[in-house]
Amino acid sequence: MKRAVTPGTFDPITFGHLDVITRAAQLMDEVIVAVAASAGKKPIFTLEERTVLARQAVEHLPNVRVEPFEGLLVDFARSREAQVLVKGLRAITDFEYEFQMAALNYQLANELETVFIMSPPQYMYLSSSIVRELASFGSPVDMFVPPHVAKALRDKFPD
Amino acid sequence: MKRAVTPGTFDPITFGHLDVITRAAQLMDEVIVAVAASAGKKPIFTLEERTVLARQAVEHLPNVRVEPFEGLLVDFARSREAQVLVKGLRAITDFEYEFQMAALNYQLANELETVFIMSPPQYMYLSSSIVRELASFGSPVDMFVPPHVAKALRDKFPD
Amino acid sequence: MKRAVTPGTFDPITFGHLDVITRAAQLMDEVIVAVAASAGKKPIFTLEERTVLARQAVEHLPNVRVEPFEGLLVDFARSREAQVLVKGLRAITDFEYEFQMAALNYQLANELETVFIMSPPQYMYLSSSIVRELASFGSPVDMFVPPHVAKALRDKFPD
Amino acid sequence: MKRAVTPGTFDPITFGHLDVITRAAQLMDEVIVAVAASAGKKPIFTLEERTVLARQAVEHLPNVRVEPFEGLLVDFARSREAQVLVKGLRAITDFEYEFQMAALNYQLANELETVFIMSPPQYMYLSSSIVRELASFGSPVDMFVPPHVAKALRDKFPD
Amino acid sequence: MKRAVTPGTFDPITFGHLDVITRAAQLMDEVIVAVAASAGKKPIFTLEERTVLARQAVEHLPNVRVEPFEGLLVDFARSREAQVLVKGLRAITDFEYEFQMAALNYQLANELETVFIMSPPQYMYLSSSIVRELASFGSPVDMFVPPHVAKALRDKFPD
Amino acid sequence: MKRAVTPGTFDPITFGHLDVITRAAQLMDEVIVAVAASAGKKPIFTLEERTVLARQAVEHLPNVRVEPFEGLLVDFARSREAQVLVKGLRAITDFEYEFQMAALNYQLANELETVFIMSPPQYMYLSSSIVRELASFGSPVDMFVPPHVAKALRDKFPD
């Protein structure tokens, strides 16, 4: 049985993340969406809020569950007995960073394999930070995130 | 059950390819190494030679088999009822090309998922063309390919 | 009045090229699609065939005309009194090459401005060479090129 | 008539920006230099100071005007009935970011075209942040910015 | 006699830095490791701590010395009568930034040559920021930094 | 004493190559310009012609000599007891290829150090292939190559 971890800050979860998670769920027996504390990034949603928003977004996927984590990703993956990390790749900048992380994680935990799924072209430009910026200016974000996330963003940035 | 195809020209198969194939074999239930005819690239080994060299290189991996193919990769993958393409990524140039191929294949056969495994740092510089060039100058290639491939290269480029 | 040249080999013209040409035609008063001889690339269609296929593809655009050319692009642009080159950008590899060409052309003809239009995500993977490869395997290409080009490709690659 | 917007933070305006603006002014009938509030970047000059410095730098260009803006660029461009965004490209990192922005803006406002002008080689290394850093160390910046901007930087960073 | 400067923030010095410094010391007659104040980066070690940690790490290299500096790198290099800057390159993002810096420094001080040494594959993923992150989670870092630096990190991040 | 090799095909030598060679000659005690046979690239000038053109171009540099070579670069460098390879870097594509070559050469001959010098902005677009293409169309190339090379190109491509 193959258990995978798909990590991220998910501040908030977007259709781009959901695309990667859905495809991971088709490839693997079990997928854990690991929501990183990422205190250094000063997320606009708390770790609990981000976990709840992600959980609601994947509740239709029976082999996917969502868990918050702090500390090193490889330690979390080990504690869950996952064999695989699944990451989405959007662009060259992603690629370089992910390459370094994959090499580092391989050194830290060589039993853990990292696989990459490329985002489809229509999600290439999509990131949580763009969604946050649009929402902060009061621009609609319904084409980028599920309805419950759009509502959470409107609550976070009232006019 | 997950059946994957790992395509390539394999002219000849290197330790870099074997690394990707071995890791794919750990992730998937069954792996088909698909040796492309690639007539346009004018390979130095025939399609049959490349297939035999690859087959010998993976014979210790019980869930891996090697098959030659001509025509479109997505047609081959469909005919074998594979759900996944597994590709190795070494560098930015690879990344761009593979991104385009993944997007194209998604358009041609959206039931087929492409996943990428990054080559470990020590294989980043390794390619069949570098191995061929070294062999053509009589330089030893034992650190880059299995012994039976090194022998085939010496036979191809006698002093 | 702004007259632009959009150069290429167009072997054959694709929906990706048409997207760039259409957008150039909205930005500029007049657009000349310049079909390069590109003898070194050994095109599968003759210069005349490529010119005719391109001409048919743009006949609905009143301010666009198609012309074959040999020699240096900057000499052609000068002879047509164009002030602008319009190029499509798909990927990093394009970017680097185009950057070098823009710097060279600026040195050769600094009155000629080069502007770039990025291809929309859905055309990022599309190139004439991919279309030729698909057609050579008998795969349908109707989603990538206009009907008259698809027919020309079927004639070029009969089963 | 073609009206273009060239957006930026302009903290402060450099010869690299002026090169792009000047070339845009030759291509388009009217150019609006849009100075973004960019509160998140914590500029060293206020929005008003940046607007004034930019305005003085372009006063010799009759078809260019400078305006500050807050909020989404596409909303500003629409309110000014611009059909085109003109951006300068210096490097791969720019390219990736700009590609994502162009794709996003196309989704948000598909009547707005984004065109790119590559910076000439001599301005490739030039950025407002490098100019700010040089000025903060008391290094002369006269070769990178107009005299009135150099003076404003000296006032901002007295010895 | 060739005197080189190898600049950095060294927060803290890693085996990747040491690899570059060691190779620079073989190429040049004298190497000055220049530890930048880098106040804007908010280093976790003070300038003095970083200088001492670097000094201990290179004490076995007779033609290498370590000095802190503030202000512009080219001014420091001039004051030490160095003819060469030696930088390590790990990745594309490095490359772009370093290219811009080399072009800028060439403009500011064209008697100063910048040369680059590529990091070996096993250090490609290694950076001070990754080391700091690992240490902050209590993860061992002995494979990435010398023992005295590992100890300093443990003191900085007690459990 | 530091002896360096600067390898290339030099088909023909350009001002970009000369810039790298000149700067290498300032950094190193002795520089050998190694002209590769590169039979696979089908050069337009013979190995002897390329060697003579390069030799004339560097005759004013007392510590530089030009030699043709066949076979592996590392074998040539070893036979000349060189400790360093000096390469020019122009762009990302160069960077990737050179990174792979440096890693390969390090594996083949780890006593041989590779250092890179970035081309100044004004030579970034310059390559032998662009010069050949310009010359083949009868375009003047005097701003890109020394006079004796321009003459050799005119002789190679008479009108």
Image (cartoon, coloured by chain):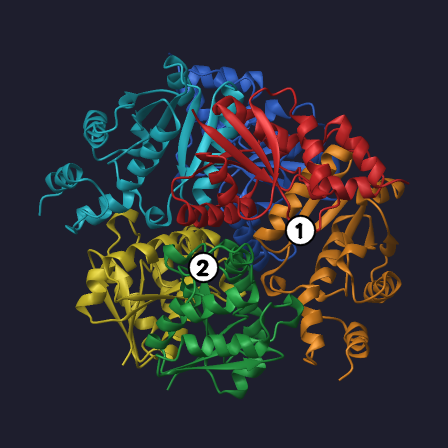
Chain colours: A orange, B blue, C yellow, D green, E red, F cyan
Question: Identity of the amino acid at label 1?
Answer: Ala
Give the image location of residue F9, x and y in percent: 30, 31
At a point 46% along the width and 34% down the height, the residue shown is E81
Q: Residues within 10 Å of mark 1 (few under 14, many from 20)?
A: few
Q: Do the numbered discs 1 and 2 sit on residues whose CB atoms are within 8 Å?
A: no
Question: Identity of the amino acid at label 2?
Answer: Val
User: Is residue A78 depicted above or below B48 in this figure?
Assistant: below
User: Is residue B122 depicted above or below A6 in this figure?
Assistant: above
Give the quadrant of residue A154.
Answer: bottom right
Instruction: Specify the farthest residue to the right.
Output: E159
User: Is residue E132 depicted above or below B59 in this figure?
Assistant: below
Under circle 1, the secondary element is helix
Q: Nearer the viewer, residue C76 or C18?
A: C76
Gap between marks 1 and 2 measured at Cα: 21 Å
Q: Is A18 situated left or right of F157 in this image?
A: right
Q: Nearer the viewer, residue B135 or F117?
A: F117
Give the quadrant of residue D117.
Answer: bottom left
Give the image location of residue E143, x and y in percent: 74, 29
Q: Which mark is residue E39?
A: 1
Q: Which mark is residue F123?
A: none
Instruction: Specify the farthest residue to the left.
Output: F159
Badge 2 is on which residue?
A: D141
Give the image location of residue F20, x and y in percent: 34, 36
Task: Tell me which chain the residue with mark 2 is part of.
Answer: D
Give the quadrant of residue A76.
Answer: top right
Q: Is B44 situated left or right of F60 in this image?
A: right
Instruction: Specify the farthest residue to the front.
Output: D159
Q: Residues within 10 Å of mark 2 (few under 14, many from 20)?
A: many
Asked if one can make out residue D5 in the rendered structure from this viewpoint, the answer is no
